Image (tube, helix red, strand yellow):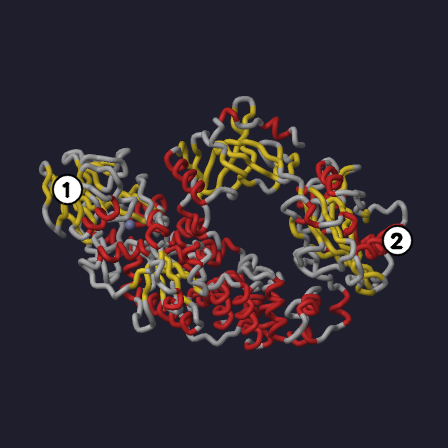
C-alpha cells in the first residue's frame, strides 16, 4: 500500500490532506520547519511553524518572516491531520515532526543525533509506521567516540598550543557546532574569543541555553590580548586576511568528516576532531529500530547504501528519495561575511 | 608497534613540514634500531611483498565487522583507502601490546607462506587488539603503497638530524639494493660497504617548471637547451661488469629492460648515465603507453621485446672512470658525455645522445619550443651551463618548459562521487565527443574546477540523472568543458580509439551548447 499522507514533490515533502510542507526547498504557503540550518529553513515561505527555540534563530537568519512558535509535543491539527514537534537532538531548537492521520503515523527527522550534546534538547524515539530519516553518515565507517573523550582531546590540544605560545583556532559552523564546542571547552585554560557571525548566533541561543562567556573580536581587540587563547570562527574564515592577524596560531576543525584522513588534509587544518551533530551508523540503526517502523525513506546522505542495508539486512520497506537537503555540506559551507561584522 | 602507530598519527596531525621532520627525527632517536631500519625501508618503497591478497582482506574484514561484503565495498569506495576502511569498520579494544614493528614485519613476511585459514585467524585476532591508528598503520603494512605524505627526502632529512649526518651523504647511502634482511641500521647509516656501493644510484636532480617566458633567466648564453622527452627518467649504472637501471622512483628496474644489459659489452667500467628510457618504433618514438607495457608485465616476453624495444636518450654523466663527477659543471659533464658516446660502436642502438638545441636569444628558444611536439617531445629542458648536478628539487639550475597542453571541448556524460571529503559530491566525470551524431567517451577527469564549480556541477548531476549503474550516474548531455591533456596516442583499449595523457578540466564552457562541442575527428587530428 502506498501512503498518500506524505509525498515527495518538486517543492519539498508535502502533506496533501493538510496542504502543508515539511522543510520545503521552494517557496510555499505553510512550512513546518525542523531546524535553523539553511538547507532546512529556506527563504520565501508565507508562514513558518517551528519550535519556540528555533523561531528566533530563523528570524535572525531570514529577517522579516511570518513565524509561529510551538512547544514540544503540542498538537497542531490541520484538516484532521495531527502534527507535533519532538526533540531531534541535532542543534538547539531542532525537531522531528510527527504526522498522524487516521491512525497512520509518520515521523520526519530533519537532521538528528542520539547523543546528548549538552545544549540541545536530547533526541527522543517516536513510535511510527513510516520513518523519513537523514543518513548523512550512513555507512559503517562512521562510529563516533563518546563526546567526553573528544572534548578531552580538544582541551588538551588547546593547553599544548597555549604552552607553545600559539593561539588555537577552532573552525565550526555558527549555528550548533560553535555553541556545542563552547559549552565543553575548559574556561580555566584561557579566554574564548568569537568571530562576529558566531557571537551573534550565540547571543540568540543564550536566551534559552546556558553557555560560558565569550568575547567578540572587533577591530579594537588588541592582538596581544588574544595570544594563547582560543578563537571559534566559521570555516569560511580559513586562510582569510582576518585570521592572519592572529599569527602564530594552530587550526582545527571539528566535524564528522574528520574521521577520514584525507578530509583533514584537504581542509588543510592542523588537527581534525571527529565530532558530529548527525547520527553515526550505529545511531541510525538504533533510531530505526526504536521507532518500530515498517517503512523507511532515506532523504539525504548515503541514501542508496543505507536503504539497501535496511531492505536486505533488516527486512524493512526502505527506499531513497532525492531531496535538496545537504546535511553537513550545507552547514559547513555557510557563507559568512566575515569582514562586515569585524572591520 | 604502538610507537610506530603514534608516529603515523602525529605525522597525520600536522601540515607543517618542520613538525613532520621533528616527529620523525624524534622517532629515529628513540625507536629500537631494527624498527628504525624498517621505518626507513617502508618510507623508501622497500615494503616486502604483500602477504595476503586484498580480496581476502576485504572478505575477512567485513566478516569481522559483521557487515555484508557489498556494504564493505561501498564503504571502501567512499573512503578511498583499503587500510583506512578496515581501520574504520572493524571494532576493537586496544590492548597493551608489546610487539614491536620489526617483529610485526617478520610476522607478516612469515604470513605469506601460511595456509589461508591461519592467515585469517592471525589477522582477525591482531586487528581486534588495536586502536584505530594501530589498525590503520598495521593494515597499511599489508596493503599496497605506504603513502602517508612523507617523501623519501623528508625522511632522509629527519634521519640526518637524528644521526647527525650530512643529508646528501645519507641520501646517497640509503639508495641501492638493500632490504632490512640484508643489512642493519648501523651498517646502512654509519658504514659504507663496497657491495652496497656497487649498485647504488645518485639522487636524481629534478627540474622545476618554468611558469613564464625564460627571459627571467637572464643571459641566454649561460644556458643550454634540449628537448624534454616523455619517457621514464632513469639512471644507468655500469660498475664492476654489472649493469643496473634505476627509475626516478628509486626502483631497480634492470629486469624490465633486459636489452640495456647489452651495454656491458662496450661501456667503459665506472660509468653512471642520466637520461630518459624510450621505446623505439622504427624511425620514430613509441608512445608512453608502449613504454607502460614494458613496465606493467611481470616478465618481459620475447614478443614484447621485439615490438617495443627500448633505448636510453642520455643527457648527463654523473660518474666517469669510477669517480663521482657531479660537482663538475654541466658544460664539462656534457663534453665528457659526448666523448663517451663517440667511443661507442657505430651500430649500437641502446644509447642515444639527447641533442643540444642551438639558440642565441630567448625568442629563438621560444620558436624551438613551438616545434617541440613535432620533434616527439613534450617541451624543452633549460640547464645552467655552470651548474653542478644538484640533489632533489633544488630550484634554479634546471627548468622544464613544457609546450602548452592540447585542448578540446567535450560534453559531460557520466559522473561518480569523489573520495574522502568529496564523497558527498559528484566530482569524477567522464567526457565524450561527437562521432556521427553520437557521443563517444574519450576521457575521465576529476580536477581543475573550483569548489564552487564542483558544487554547481554536483547539483546538476543530482537533478539530471538519467540512469544509474552502481555508483555511476548517467546525466543529460548538457554541460561542456574544455579538457586539457599532455599527449595523445592511438589505443585499442579505448572505445574512442585514442588515449590521452593527464586529462583535466581547464574551464567550464558555459558559453557553449553541447552540440558545439568538438568531434572525435577533431581529437584524432592531434595524432
Ligand atoms: Zn542541520
Same chain letter for marks 1 and 2:
no
Number of numbered tags placed on the structure image: 2
For the C terminus of chain B, the image quarter is: top right
Cβ–Cβ under 8 Å for marks 1 and 2: no
**Label 2 packing within 10 angstroms: few (<14), some (14-19), many (20+):** few
**Label 1 packing within 10 angstroms: few (<14), some (14-19), many (20+):** few
Q: Position of residue A42 (x, y in %)?
A: 26, 41
Residue B460 located left or right of residue B349: left
Residue B416 located left or right of residue B463: right
Of circles 1 and 2, the one toward us is 2
Q: Position of residue B190 (x, y in %)?
A: 69, 76
**Residue topped by disc 2:** B339
Q: Chain of mark 1?
A: A
Residue at image location 65% in from the left, 48% down from the top: B210
Q: CA distance from mark 1 to mark 2?
A: 92 Å
Quarter of image, res A67 = top left
Point out the residue furthest to the top here: B436
Quarter of image, res A279 = bottom left
SS class of the residue under badge 2? helix
Q: Position of residue B130 (x, y in %)?
A: 43, 68
Residue at image location 57% in from the left, 63% down from the top: B112
Residue B53 located left or right of residue B376: left
Point out the residue furthest to the front here: A220
> Would you say residue A143 is visible in this rendering?
no
Q: Nearer the viewer, residue B371 or A151?
A: B371
Q: Nearer the viewer, residue B426 or A284?
A: B426
**Residue topped by disc 1:** A104
> Would you say residue B236 is visible in this rendering?
yes
Q: Nearer the viewer, residue A96 or A336?
A: A336
- Placement of A40 over or under B261, stated as above or below: above
Amino acid at each position: 500500500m502506498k501512503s498518500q499522507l506524505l509525498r515527495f514533490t518538486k517543492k519539498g515533502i508535502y502533506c496533501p490532506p493538510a496542504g502543508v510542507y515539511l522543510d520545503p526547498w521552494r517557496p510555499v504557503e505553510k512550512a513546518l520547519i525542523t531546524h535553523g540550518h539553511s538547507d532546512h529553513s529556506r527563504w520565501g515561505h508565507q508562514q513558518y511553524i517551528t519550535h519556540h527555540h528555533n523561531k528566533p534563530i530563523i528570524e535572525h537568519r531570514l529577517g522579516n518572516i511570518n513565524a509561529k512558535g510551538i512547544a514540544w509535543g503540542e498538537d497542531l491539527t490541520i484538516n484532521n491531520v495531527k502534527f507535533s514537534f519532538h526533540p531531534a537532538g541535532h542543534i538547539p531548537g531542532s525537531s522531528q515532526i510527527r504526522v498522524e492521520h487516521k491512525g497512520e503515523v509518520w515521523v520526519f527527522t530533519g537532521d538528528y543525533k542520539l547523543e546528548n550534546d549538552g545544549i540541545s534538547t536530547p533526541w527522543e524515539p517516536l513510535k511510527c509506521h513510516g520513518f523519513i530519516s537523514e543518513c548523512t553518515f550512513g555507512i559503517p565507517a562512521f562510529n563516533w567516540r563518546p563526546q567526553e573523550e573528544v572534548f578531552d582531546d580538544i582541551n588538551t590540544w588547546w593547553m599544548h598550543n597555549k604552552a607553545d605560545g600559539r593561539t588555537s583556532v577552532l573552525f565550526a559552523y555558527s549555528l550548533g557546532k560553535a555553541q556545542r564546542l563552547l559549552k565543553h571547552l575548559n574556561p580555566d585554560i584561557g579566554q574564548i574569543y568569537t568571530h562576529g557571525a558566531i557571537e551573534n548566533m550565540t547571543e540568540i541561543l543564550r536566551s534559552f541555553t546556558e553557555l560560558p562567556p565569550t568575547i567578540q573580536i572587533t577591530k579594537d581587540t588588541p592582538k596581544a590580548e588574544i595570544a594563547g587563547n582560543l578563537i571559534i570562527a566559521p570555516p569560511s574564515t580559513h586562510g582569510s586576511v582576518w585570521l592572519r592577524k592572529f599569527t602564530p596560531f594552530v587550526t582545527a576543525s571539528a566535524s564528522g568528516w574528520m574521521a577520514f584522513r584525507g578530509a583533514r588534509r584537504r581542509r588543510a587544518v592542523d588537527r581534525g576532531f571527529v565530532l558530529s551533530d548527525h547520527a553515526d551508523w550505529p545511531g541510525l540503526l538504533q533510531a530505526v529500530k526504536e521507532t518500530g517502523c515498517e517503512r523507511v525513506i532515506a532523504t539525504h546522505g548515503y541514501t542508496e547504501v543505507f536503504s539497501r542495508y535496511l531492505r536486505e539486512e533488516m527486512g524493512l520497506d526502505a527506499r531513497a528519495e532525492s531531496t535538496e537537503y545537504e546535511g553537513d555540506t550545507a552547514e559547513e559551507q555557510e557563507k559568512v561575511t566575515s569582514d562586515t561584522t569585524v572591520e | 608497534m604502538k610507537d610506530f602507530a603514534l608516529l603515523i598519527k602525529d605525522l597525520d596531525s600536522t601540515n607543517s613540514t618542520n613538525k613532520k621532520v621533528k616527529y620523525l627525527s624524534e622517532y629515529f632517536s628513540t625507536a629500537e634500531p631494527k624498527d628504525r631500519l624498517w621505518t626507513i625501508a617502508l618510507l623508501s618503497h622497500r615494503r616486502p611483498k604483500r602477504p595476503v591478497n586484498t580480496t581476502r582482506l576485504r572478505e575477512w574484514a567485513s566478516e569481522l565487522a559483521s557487515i555484508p561484503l557489498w556494504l564493505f565495498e561501498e564503504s571502501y569506495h567512499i573512503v578511498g583507502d583499503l587500510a583506512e576502511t578496515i581501520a574504520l569498520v572493524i571494532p576493537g579494544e586496544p590492548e597493551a601490546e608489546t610487539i614491536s614493528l620489526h617483529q610485526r614485519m617478520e610476522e607478516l613476511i612469515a604470513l605469506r607462506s601460511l595456509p589461508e585459514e591461519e592467515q585469517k585467524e592471525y589477522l582477525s585476532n591482531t586487528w581486534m587488539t588495536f586502536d584505530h591508528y594501530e589498525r590503520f598503520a598495521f593494515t597499511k603494512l599489508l596493503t599496497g603503497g605506504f603513502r602517508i605524505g612523507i617523501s623519501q627526502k623528508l625522511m632522509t632529512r629527519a634521519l640526518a638530524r637524528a644521526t647527525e649526518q650530512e643529508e646528501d651523504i645519507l641520501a646517497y647511502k640509503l639508495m641501492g639494493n638493500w632490504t632490512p634482511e640484508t643489512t642493519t641500521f648501523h651498517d646502512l647509516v654509519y658504514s659504507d660497504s663496497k657491495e652496497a656501493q656497487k649498485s647504488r644510484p645518485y639522487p636524481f636532480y629534478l627540474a622545476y617548471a618554468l611558469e613564464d617566458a625564460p627571459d627571467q633567466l637572464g643571459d641566454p648564453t649561460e644556458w643550454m637547451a634540449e628537448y624534454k622527452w616523455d619517457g621514464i627518467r632513469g639512471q644507468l649504472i655500469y660498475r664492476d661488469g654489472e649493469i643496473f637501471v634505476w627509475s626516478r622512483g628509486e626502483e631497480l628496474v634492470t629486469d624490465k629492460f633486459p636489452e640495456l644489459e647489452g651495454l656491458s659489452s662496450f661501456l667503459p667500467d665506472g660509468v653512471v648515465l642520466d637520461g630518459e628510457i624510450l621505446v623505439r618504433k622504427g624511425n620514430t618514438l613509441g608512445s608512453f603507453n608502449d613504454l607502460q607495457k614494458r613496465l606493467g608485465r611481470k616478465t618481459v616476453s620475447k614478443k614484447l621485446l621485439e615490438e617495443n624495444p627500448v633505448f636510453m636518450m642520455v643527457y648527463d654523466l654523473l660518474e666517469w672512470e669510477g669517480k663521482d663527477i657531479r660537482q663538475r659543471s654541466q658544460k664539462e659533464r656534457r663534453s665528457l658525455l659526448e666523448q663517451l658516446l663517440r667511443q661507442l660502436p657505430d651500430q649500437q642502438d641502446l644509447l642515444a645522445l639527447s641533442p643540444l638545441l642551438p639558440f642565441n636569444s630567448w625568442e629563438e628558444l621560444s620558436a624551438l619550443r613551438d616545434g617541440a611536439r613535432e620533434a616527439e617531445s613534450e617541451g624543452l629542458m633549460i640547464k645552467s651551463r655552470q651548474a653542478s648536478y644538484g640533489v632533489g628539487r633544488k630550484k634554479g639550475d634546471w627548468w622544464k618548459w613544457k609546450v602548452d597542453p592540447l585542448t578540446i571541448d567535450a560534453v559531460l556524460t557520466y559522473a561518480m562521487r569523489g573520495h574522502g571529503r568529496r564523497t558527498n559530491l559528484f566530482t569524477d566525470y567522464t567526457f565524450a565527443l561527437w562521432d556521427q551524431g553520437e557521443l563517444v567517451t574519450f576521457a575521465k577527469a576529476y580536477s581543475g574546477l573550483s569548489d564552487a564549480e564542483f558544487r554547481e556541477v554536483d547539483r546538476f548531476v543530482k537533478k539530471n540523472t538519467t540512469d544509474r549503474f552502481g555508483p555511476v550516474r548517467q546525466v543529460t548531455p548538457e554541460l561542456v568543458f574544455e579538457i586539457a591533456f599532455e599527449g595523445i596516442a592511438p589505443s585499442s583499449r579505448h572505445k574512442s580509439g585514442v588515449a590521452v595523457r593527464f586529462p583535466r578540466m581547464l574551464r567550464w564552457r558555459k558559453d557553449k551548447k553541447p552540440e558545439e562541442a568538438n568531434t572525435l575527428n577533431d581529437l584524432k587530428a592531434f595524432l
